[in-house]
Image: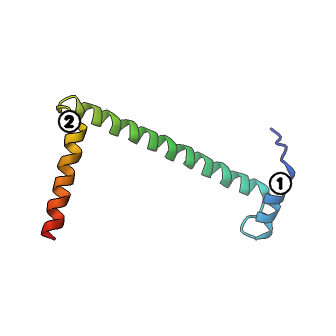
Amino acid sequence: MSIILTQKQEKFIQAKLQTGKYRTAQEILEFAFRLLDEYEQADSDWANSVREKIDAAIAVSEHTPPVEGKAFVNQILEQLNSSCRMG
């Protein structure tokens, strides 16, 4: 496989080589591919974690009676007011 790089990509690779941290362009590309793979795995893990949390919340909500929004907010405000009076 051959890859055609843009001028900007070539300059980026040359700059990295000049730092002395990398010996070859191949080494830089291998590192970049490894980072891409790790990024995609982390993204997939995050999406799976969110799905699990949503599923768990749905399961809990199926067994929890609904709460009327205005009454809920008023209850929280009352608790805050009583906390402020105590403190």
Q: Is residue 29 left or right of residue 35?
A: right
Tell me the quarter of the picture where residue 22 sits: bottom right
- Which x, y percent locates residue 49? 39, 42
Tell me the quarter of the picture where residue 83 sits: bottom left
Give the camera-side residue of 64 and 2.
Answer: 64
Say which residue appears at 50% left-offset and 47% top-offset. Answer: 42
- Which x, y percent locates residue 32? 67, 52
- Of the two numbered discs 2 and 1 on the same chain, state the one appearing first in sequence: 1
Say which residue appears at 12% left-offset and 68% top-offset. Answer: 86
Say which residue appears at 32% left-offset and 33% top-offset. Answer: 55
Q: Is residue 74 left or right of residue 31?
A: left
The residue singled out by tag 2 in the image is: 67
Query: Disc 1 on helix, strand or loop?
Result: helix
Residue lying at the far right of the rendered structure: 7
Tell me the quarter of the picture where residue 56 sits: top left
The residue singled out by tag 1 in the image is: 8
Give the camera-side residue of 59 and 66.
Answer: 66
Q: From the image, which quarter does the C terminus lie in?
A: bottom left
Q: Measure how far apart labels 2 and 1 are at the Cα level.
A: 56 Å
- Which x, y percent locates residue 31? 66, 55
Give the camera-side residue of 79 and 14.
Answer: 79
Q: Nearer the viewer, mark 2 or mark 1?
A: 2
Say which residue appears at 76% left-offset and 53% top-offset. Answer: 26
How dense is the environment of label 1, judged by Cα within 10 Å: few (below 14), some, or many (20 and up)?
Answer: few
Q: Is residue 22 left or right of residue 63?
A: right
